[in-house]
Image (spheres, helix red, strand yellow):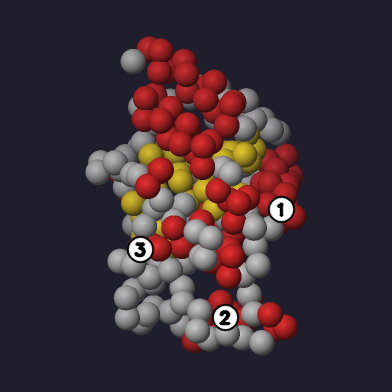
C-alpha cells in the first residue's frame, strides 16, 4: 500500500502494479517555459518547474515496478478550428493587465514546439499519450477505453496545473469509478492558493474524490515491487 490521507492507497490493501497507472498531466513547454502560459498570465512558472525532479523519480520508479505510465498534452488543432470564440476571449482576458483582453495570445497548438512534453520527461514509445483540447483528459478522448482495455482501475496523478487540468482529470476519473491518488508535491500551480485548495478538495468528505500522498510515500510503496523484478 501507499501511505496517504485520509486512507491508504488503494483502499483494498493490495497494490497491483499492472492495475495502477501513473498519470503525468500536461508537463509541456507551453506551460513551463519562461515566456509560456504561466508567465504570460502573471503566474510563477518556477513553482511548476520545481516538481520536475519528483515526477522524474516517480516515472522511473513506476517503469521499474511495472506500472503503466500515461501522459496528457493540452493543445488545439493547427487551424484552431476547435478553439471556440469564448475560449479565445477567456485566454486573452484572464491574463490581461487592467482587465483589457489581449487577443494576440495563442493557446497551445498541436505540432508546435510548445505543445511537446519537456525533454526531462520524455515519454517512451510504448506509453500512451492522450491529446486533448479540454481541461480533463477523459472528455472527448479514448483515455477511458484505453485504461479499461489494459485493466487499469487505480490512478496516481501528477503534473500541472493542480487546480485545473490535474484536478479536472482526477474528478472525471473518480466519476468513472477509478481509485485516485494525488501526489501533492508532484503537482503544482502558478497560484499557491489554488494548489492548496485543490489538495483540500480532494480529501473532502473523507476522501470523496480520492487520497493525497507524497512522492516519498509512492516511491516507498513502489520500491518493494522494484526489488522483486
- Which quarter of the rendered picture does the N terminus lie within? top right
CA distance for labels 3 and 2: 21 Å
Choose between 138 and 208: the one closer to the eye. 138
Residue 192 - label: 1
Q: Residues within 10 Å of mark 3 (few under 14, many from 20)?
A: few
CA distance for labels 1 and 2: 22 Å
Query: Disc 3, disc 1: CB below 8 Å?
Result: no
Q: Quadrant of residue 229?
A: top left
What percent of the width, then of the height, locates residue 196? 72, 49
**Which residue is most to the front?**
34
Q: Is residue 16 visible?
A: yes
What percent of the width, then of the height, locates residue 204? 73, 46
What residue appears at the point 38 percent right and 12 percent down from the top-left corner?
228
Q: Label 3 belongs to which residue?
A: 113
What residue appears at the point 47 percent right and 18 percent down from the top-left corner?
223
Q: Mark 3 or mark 2: which is in front?
A: 3
**Which residue is most to the top?**
228
The relative height of residue 21 versus residue 89 in the rendered view (above or below) is above
Q: Label 2 belongs to which residue?
A: 92
Mark 3 vs mark 1: which is more N-terminal?
3
Q: How many marks?
A: 3
What percent of the width, then of the height, locates residue 114? 40, 63
What residue appears at the point 32 percent right and 81 percent down from the top-left corner?
79
Choose between 83 and 189: the one closer to the eye. 189
CA distance for labels 3 and 1: 27 Å
Q: Secondary structure at mark 1?
A: helix
Query: Disc 1, disc 2: CB below 8 Å?
Result: no
**Which residue is most to the left?**
125
Q: Residues within 10 Å of mark 2 (few under 14, many from 20)?
A: many
Mark 3 vs mark 2: which is more N-terminal?
2
Q: Residues within 10 Å of mark 1 (few under 14, many from 20)?
A: some
Q: Mark 3 or mark 1: which is in front?
A: 3
Amino acid at each position: 500500500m501507499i501511505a496517504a490521507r485520509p486512507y491508504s492507497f488503494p483502499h483494498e490493501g493490495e497494490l497491483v502494479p499492472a492495475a495502477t497507472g501513473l498519470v503525468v498531466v500536461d508537463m509541456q513547454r507551453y506551460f513551463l517555459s519562461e515566456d509560456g502560459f504561466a508567465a504570460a498570465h502573471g503566474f510563477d512558472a518556477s513553482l511548476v518547474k520545481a516538481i520536475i525532479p519528483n515526477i522524474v523519480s516517480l516515472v522511473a520508479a513506476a517503469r521499474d515496478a511495472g506500472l503503466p505510465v500515461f501522459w496528457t498534452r493540452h493543445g488545439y488543432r493547427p487551424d484552431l478550428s476547435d478553439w471556440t470564440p469564448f475560449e479565445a476571449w477567456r485566454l486573452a482576458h484572464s491574463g490581461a493587465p487592467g482587465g483589457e483582453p489581449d487577443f494576440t495570445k495563442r493557446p497551445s497548438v498541436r505540432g508546435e514546439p510548445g505543445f511537446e512534453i519537456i525533454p526531462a520527461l520524455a515519454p517512451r514509445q510504448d506509453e500512451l499519450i492522450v491529446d486533448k483540447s479540454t481541461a480533463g483528459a477523459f472528455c472527448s478522448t479514448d483515455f477511458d477505453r484505453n485504461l479499461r482495455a489494459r485493466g487499469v482501475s487505480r490512478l496516481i496523478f501528477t503534473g500541472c496545473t493542480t487546480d485545473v487540468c490535474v484536478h479536472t482529470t482526477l474528478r472525471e476519473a473518480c466519476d468513472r469509478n477509478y481509485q485516485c491518488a494525488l501526489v501533492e508535491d508532484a503537482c503544482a500551480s502558478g497560484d499557491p492558493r489554488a494548489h492548496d485548495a485543490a489538495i483540500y478538495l480532494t480529501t473532502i468528505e473523507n476522501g470523496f474524490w480520492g487520497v493525497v500522498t507524497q512522492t516519498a510515500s509512492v516511491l516507498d510503496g513502489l520500491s518493494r515491487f522494484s526489488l522483486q523484478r
